[in-house]
Image (spheres, rainbow, N blue to C red):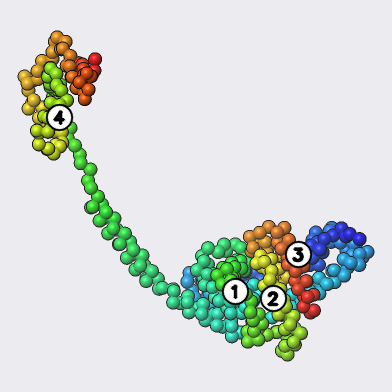
Amino acid sequence: MELRATALWMSGVGPEAEGRVEFTILLERAISGDVSAFEQIILRYERRVFSLAWRLLGRPEDAQDASQDVFLRAFRYLHRFDRRRPFEPWLMKMTVNVCHDLSRKRHAQPQDVINPEVLRAADDPHHELHTEQQRTILYRALQQLPEKERAAVVLRDVEGLSTAEVAEILGSSEATVRSQISSARLKIKKAVKRGHV
Amino acid sequence: MKCRYSETDIALYVEGDVAPAKACEIEAHLSVCTQCGDFVIELRESQAVLKTLKQDTVSATSLRLVRSHVLAEIQAGVKPLWGRWIYALAGGVFVAVLAVGWVLEMPRPQVQEIVKSHPLPSPAAVPLTRGTITIAEADAKIDRQPLRRREKPKIPSRRKPEAVTRTEVPPEPSEPAKPLVVKLLTDDPSIVIYWLIDNTGGAL
């Protein structure tokens, strides 16, 4: 540990790089079968994975199943992960694939897209009716989009990834992603206008 | 008025997904086109609503539930290191036993001995019967003979060539033999077919 700290100090790297080194060590331990190390990884990414799955699938129950599947798959295929690349896009890609499999398996239509037990606004504890209506309309609009368009617009506009990152996750070209997100934005605009939000 | 820019272009422009040069052009167009300007305002509003999804948070209970399920499944699936070795060893032994059994069951190729022997004698020439034979007589002969099972032709053994003596081999006919005449009688007594066959069995 001291040796590593010295090396980091000598190379003049910041806390971000140090965090990256710590994560790499965590990853190595998880690959070698250390469950507690993998638990740390879950804690770091569970919220991101769950919320992405939920936005893609539209139902919190499905998102819960998908999240479990994502982490189990991640543990199984952790040894295949290229350690020179960032971990988060790899996990996001896995989440998109799991959600795709799950939605194909269930062919489920969104029913209760808003579940107060699972979801609540972080900043607003009062749950205004207007906000809930907005979200209901939005989730319905998202579920009506084609799967690729939904994934593209959620990753780009909600998750805040760049077009290049979205393209890599979806395995498409940047031009295709741009076409998908523009189409999705126009459809969402129509849905929001129809809903008188 | 027909605008130069499509809705798709504007949908990309509102989130900065177009090249800077094109963005400048669209901005210039928006300052003069109220229709496109209104469209941009509506799009920005719907995009703002879409981005409110970022504020949603997942409850800690749901996350804890997912985590506990995942860890329980992983711990149930992870075997200790020695356990993995035992399975690997058992698998190896099983494969080895199968391989040995297969080798033992495999038929061994028969190695034939090469025996130096005298050259084979030439086949005995059977003198052909001369004369005529009618089909009716031949049928009668066949009818009298009892049915017998067909026997496999015996192949002369190469190991005992001395069993066949050269004295038994009849000398080859030096003079040309007379052809064999086969007379075939038909239902019509006025039609008789004669078949001339030479010594080699070929028709003349």
Discs 3/2, front: 2
Judge if badges 3 and 2 mark residues of a common chain. yes
Q: Residue at x 63, y 87 (%)?
A: A117
Question: Does label 3 or label 2 sit earlier along the sequence?
Answer: 2
In the picture, the quarter occupied by the N terminus of chain A is bottom right
**Numbered disc 4: secondary structure:** helix
Q: Find out whether the residues at labels 3 and 2 contact each other: C-beta distance under 8 Å.
A: no
Which is nearer the eye, B88 or B44?
Answer: B44
Type of amino acid under label 2: Arg
**Numbered disc 3: secondary structure:** helix
Discs 4/3, front: 4
Discs 1/4, front: 4
Q: Which residue is mark 2?
A: A140
Q: What x and y, as percent, mark residue B40? A: 84, 69
- Measure the alpha-carbon separation of dots 2 and 1: 13 Å
**Chain of the residue under the numbered disc 2 shown in the image:** A
- Measure the alpha-carbon separation of dots 3 and 2: 18 Å
Image quadrant in which you'd find residue B128: top left
